[in-house]
Image (spheres, grey):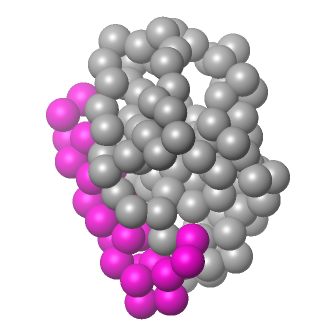
Amino acid sequence: MENSNRSQISEAFAKIHGGNNIEAYSAGSKPSGKINPLAIAAMKELGYDLAMHHSKSLKAVEQFAPFDIIVTMGCGDACPWMPSKKFIDWDIPDPKEMNEEGFSIIKDKIKEKVKELLATL
């Protein structure tokens, strides 16, 4: 929804593990305009600078459609629709109110989901 945590981390892991073979874009239905400092810190531990990302709306990424795969993170307020060959929903809790330990668990879960998805491509 806010494009400040889960999808930003997913985009980062897609770039880390997919390299130049993957184009990944994160967006939210109600972007907050900022990246959660806990998300920035969690990815910094892995050597990835999430501070270079910015919170985007779905409208901001529709120019890249059609997509091969769209992954949603539990949909929340509404499941977005854009032209895509495949839709996947990862029902992953929003870590924005979690402590660092909880946030780290969510980050690791997202990493594994991204790696699993990339292995199927």
Residue 39's place in the image compared with 30, above or below, is below
Q: Is 107 in the magenta?
A: yes
* Location of residue 55 in the rendering, given as x and y in whole percent from the top left corner: 73, 49
- State left or right for residue 102 relative to residue 62: left
**Residue at (25, 41) in percent of width and height:** 117
State the image coordinates of residue 119 (x, y, percent, origin top left).
Answer: 20, 41
Compared across the picture, whether 114 is left or right of 61 comes to left
From where the camera sits, is residue 21 visible?
no
Q: Nearer the viewer, residue 89 or 78?
A: 78
Q: Total of numbered circles in the picture?
A: 0
Q: Residue 23 appears at what percent x and percent y?
A: 52, 31
Going by the image, does 82 lie left or right of 51?
left
x and y percentages locating residue 68 in the rendered image: 39, 18
| Residue found 41% across the figure and 69% down from its top | 107
Q: Could you tell me which residue is drawn at 59 percent across and 46 percent down? A: 1
User: Is residue 62 left or right of 6 when viewed as pictured?
Assistant: right
Give 97 or 10, whichever is nearer the viewer. Answer: 97
Give the residue at x 34% y 78%: 105
Q: Quadrant of the C terminus?
A: top left
Is 81 located above or below residue 70 in the figure? above
Please tell me in which quadrant of the rendered image residue 35 appears.
bottom right
Q: Residue furthest right?
A: 33
Q: Which stretch is magenta?
A: 96-121
| Main secondary structure found in the magenta portion | helix
In the figure, 19 relative to 49: above or below?
Answer: above
Compare residues 26 and 115 and report the one nearer the observer. Answer: 26
Q: Point out the residue furthest to the front here.
A: 77
Visible residue check, residue 119: yes
